[in-house]
Image (cartoon, grey):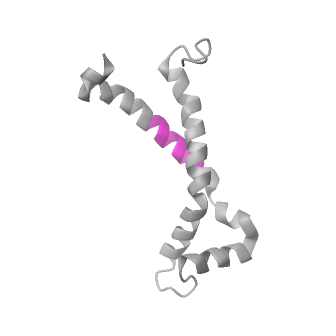
Amino acid sequence: MTRFPDKFDSAAKARIPAALLGGLFACYLTQPFDTVKTCMQGDIERKTYGTFSETAKMLHSEAGISAFYRGATFRYARMCCAIFMMDTLQGLVGPALFPNAFK
């Protein structure tokens, strides 16, 4: 808001691009790890997947790098919504909880 006061004249206008960028980084940096973890959790009897590295190797052999980003679109949308809600809630609850910090 400080660097672009003409475009972001209110906190609400700044929250949308902040949520999109925050969601983008949060999603795509952690998606490969989440995919491996999800595969391991789904294999309760441990017949298909083994350790973390074995699961990663198996996914990579199946479909290359793209195998690690299965479901990323849904996760990105969910992450953006979560970041937007947390930021909005912080803006509403923060001043009530810590009034001295927002004077």
Q: Nearer the viewer, residue 29 or 20?
A: 29
Q: Is residue 29 above or below residue 55?
A: above
Q: Position of residue 7 (x, y in %)?
A: 62, 16
Image quarter hosting the C terminus: top left
Q: Position of residue 16 (x, y in %)?
A: 56, 29
**Residue at 55%, 40% in the rendered image:** 22
Q: Quadrant of residue 32?
A: bottom right
Q: Is residue 24 above or below residue 91?
A: below
| Stretch of the chain drawn in magenta | 76-85
Q: Position of residue 31 (x, y in %)?
A: 59, 58
Image quarter hosting the N terminus: top right
**Residue at 59%, 77% in the rendered image:** 53
Q: Nearer the viewer, residue 33 or 85?
A: 33
Based on the picture, tell me whether residue 5 belongs to the magenta stretch. Answer: no
Left or right, 103 with respect to 35, comes to: left
Q: How many marks?
A: 0
Left or right, 89 with respect to 56, comes to: left
Q: Position of residue 56 (x, y in %)?
A: 62, 74
Based on the picture, tell me whether residue 80 belongs to the magenta stretch. Answer: yes
**Residue at 24%, 29% in the rendered image:** 97
Q: Nearer the viewer, residue 101 or 13?
A: 101
Q: Main secondary structure of the magenta part?
A: helix
Q: Is residue 72 above or below residue 50?
A: above
Q: Nearer the viewer, residue 35 or 45?
A: 35
